[in-house]
Every structure is written in structure tokens, then in C-alpha cells.
Amino acid sequence: MAMVTLFIVSDDKPASSNETVVLDIPINLPEQDKTKPEPKAEPTIAESTIKELPAPEPKIEEAWQSVEVKSGDNLSTIFRRVGLTPQDVYRISKATKKSKALTKLMPGQRLDFVINQGRIEKILHIINPLQRDLVSLNSDGGYDIERIERELEVRQKFAKSTIQNSLFVDGQKAGLSQKKLMEMAKIFGWDIDFALDIRAGDSFVVLYETTYLDDKPFGEGEILAAQFINQGRIVNAIRHSDGNYYNEKGYSMRKAFLRSPVDFFRISSKYNLKRKHPILKVVRPHRGVDYAAPTGTPIKASGDGKVIWKGTKGGYGRTIIIQHAGIYTTLYAHMSKYHSKVNKGSRVKQGQVIGYIGSSGMSTGPHLHYEFRVNGVHKNPLKVKFPNVEPLNEQQMQTFAPLGENLLDQLQAYKLGTP
């Protein structure tokens, strides 16, 4: 309830009387309903716009089916396993005929399918970790083929060690694989005989590449630079863009001849002009080196050349003689057999297998008798100085010299433990 006050002035009285009547009148007003919510404010333009935007449609995930290729599988057997028909095989084979995708299926590979209502939308052929073929349905109803090549990340890595046992034992302790150690032994093999020359206290440091896929180790790359200290003698090797290795002066690490024509051996008899013959029991000059190894061990040509003798040669047994660059010849005796592709007149390359160790002729056990001659004169194969191959020319050295200096500086910094 509320009160209203009225002031009434009579018009009948003179103005001087100033008579006013005051009335207080009670009235009832409707009460406010507090149970009803407050009226909402009108939305702003921005709010209206947001409310009018449609909700995003949910993302449709592709349903992939995976099939591993098994021995004896072909496209038909694999398609049958995922519910596809011979017509599908024909259609896909026709689409991929030119690109030859899906034609070389090997056990262990994987095929991934996206099939929608019986229609092939995608096929992903994972050939290997780095290669895959993608077959995709296009808007015309045909199929597009895409070869996907994954790239490896290349990182550089160092290793170093001081020899206490052997290159292979201490090298593996330093984190190098047997393959990488074999590569290093091959690089330095013309200057260092790793079977005879290695001493405790020798050391090496190497910079090489490793590869990563999806941030996980994948494989090993090339040796970029290495240093080997053998009995105080420092030998450096730097990889050139031609794939070969050279020292800091541009001379090739590869020499005209291998230091040893066999791997994994021991020397049973050295070059000795006063040696007593083990069978004849008389003093007879031994003008070569005997390498003892199991029967069947491969024998390699120590240098490029031409086979001028293949056959039995008295006490030498089965023998091969190779002529190199006019003035040099090498002889390989007591073989068990020859390599099938090596004959008299054949051209051979350094490191090519020419035969296998045996005990033919006058021999007390399986070994290779190896001789090295210069202008027909015998030389000690373990001590003779081998000729170098062609060094880098002046123009090549302009780019190689600073590269080599930088790599050797990195080796030295790692060796000394400095950043």
C-alpha cells in the first residue's frame, strides 16, 4: 500500500485568503514478482554473429586396413584378404601398369588400404623404410600414383681410442661398428699393416656420418676424416667429393699396391735370403712372404694389372703371376683353386679375388706365398715403397685444402676435448 497526498486550492475564495485543503489518500499498487527472471539485455552484434556460426562438422578419420605381404603373395591373394574382387585387381593393375607400382611385392612389405563401401580410395605400398607408393582415387574416378621418398637426417659423430688390445676390440669399445672399423682399416691399409704394424699406445680419432629417421638411429654414413698414429707416425685421411681419400697434401691414400693380398692372416715365414727350407732342409733364399690362413681364404690382386701366368709352376703349385704398369710383377702361389673368371690374359683390378689359399705344390700347410718384383728383381713385400696414384691437381686443391684443414682442426679439437 502507498499514500498519495493531494493539495486542493479553491477558486471561489479571494487570492488573499490562501486557503488550501490537504488530503492523504491511501492506494494499492501491484507488487513486483521477484520470482520472475530479470529481462535479458539485447545481444550485441558480435554476440549475434558468434551465435549464428554453424558448429564445425566432425573430422572423419580414414579407416586403414593393413596387410603384410607373405611368401607366395600377389595382388590377387592380398586383395582377396581385404574383401576385394578380381575386377578391383584388374582396375588397379591397369591404373598402375605404366608406373609399375604394386608390381614388386616382397615378403615383409606392407600394403595399407582405405576402402569405402567396397570402393578402393587409397592403397599405400610401404616398400622399405624410405620408399612408398601411394595409389589414390581421383575426382575422375581413376587413380593417381605418387612415389614418396623419405629423407634421412644426417648427423656427424666422433670417436677416438688408444689401442691396448687391437683395433677391433678397442674400436668397438669407442662405439664404432665392425663395418666402420673395416672401412677405416681399408682407408689406412696402404700405409699401415694392421696385422703386423699395430702397437699398444697407437691411437686414432675419426669423424663420420650417422643417419636418423624419425629422430631414431637408422644407419651409418661415410667417414669424413680420420687420423691414425702408428708407432709415432701420424697418418691423416680426408674424404674428397670424388669419394676417395687423400692426405692433407692431396696425395691419395690409395697406393698402386695393397700392402697385403689376404685378410685375417698371420705371417708364417718372412722374406729371408738365408732361410732353411722346411722340407728340403737346406738353406734356400725365401724371396717372398708366406701368409698362413685357412684353406679357401680369398686371395686378392694387390694391384691393377694383367694375368701373364695361370697354372702349375713346380714347387709353387697352382700359381698366378700379374704384370702391373710395366716394371712390377706379383706372384701368388700354393693356391687351392683359381677364381673361375680369372684366366691368362685377364685384366684384374686391385682387390679383385683371383684365387683361394691352399697347399698345392711343395707346401707344409695352407698358406699364400707372395712375391713382389721390380724390373724382375725381388723386393721385400713388407718393406718396399709403393708408388702413389695420381694426386689432386692444383685446381682441385683450391677447394680440398681448406676443407681438409677444417676437418683436421675438428679432429684435433675433439681429441683434446675442446669444443
Image (cartoon, rainbow, N blue to C red):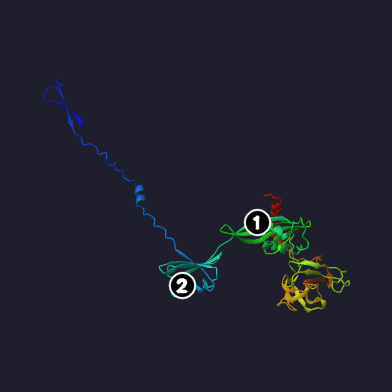
Question: Is residue 294 or residue 333 the one in the foreground?
Answer: 294
Residue that mark 2 sits on: 80
Tell me the crowding category of disc 1: few under 14, some 14 to 19, or many 20 or more residues within 10 angstroms, Cα based.
few
Residue 398 in view, yes or no = no
175 displayed left or right of 81 = right
Secondary structure, mark 1, is strand
Residue 160 in view, yes or no = yes
Q: Amino acid at mark 1?
A: Lys
Question: Is residue 139 or residue 397 the one in the foreground?
Answer: 139
Q: Is residue 310 above or below residue 25?
A: below
Image point 79% across, 79% down: which residue?
Answer: 312
Residue that mark 1 sits on: 157
Q: Earlier in the sequence, mark 1 or mark 2?
A: 2
Q: Is residue 13 above or below residue 79?
A: above
Tell me the crowding category of disc 2: few under 14, some 14 to 19, or many 20 or more residues within 10 angstroms, Cα based.
few
Q: Amino acid at mark 2?
A: Arg
Which-is-in-front pick, marks 1 and 2? 2
Residue 29, quarter of the rendered image: top left
Residue 263, quarter of the rendered image: bottom right
Image point 85% across, 68% down: which residue?
Answer: 272
**Residue 22: where, in percent of width, then height?**
16, 25
Mark-to-mark CA distance, 1 and 2: 48 Å
Hey, which residue is sitting farthest left in the picture?
Answer: 12
Secondary structure, mark 2, is helix
88 displayed left or right of 364 = left
**Residue 245: where, in percent of width, then height?**
71, 63
**Residue 156: where, in percent of width, then height?**
64, 57
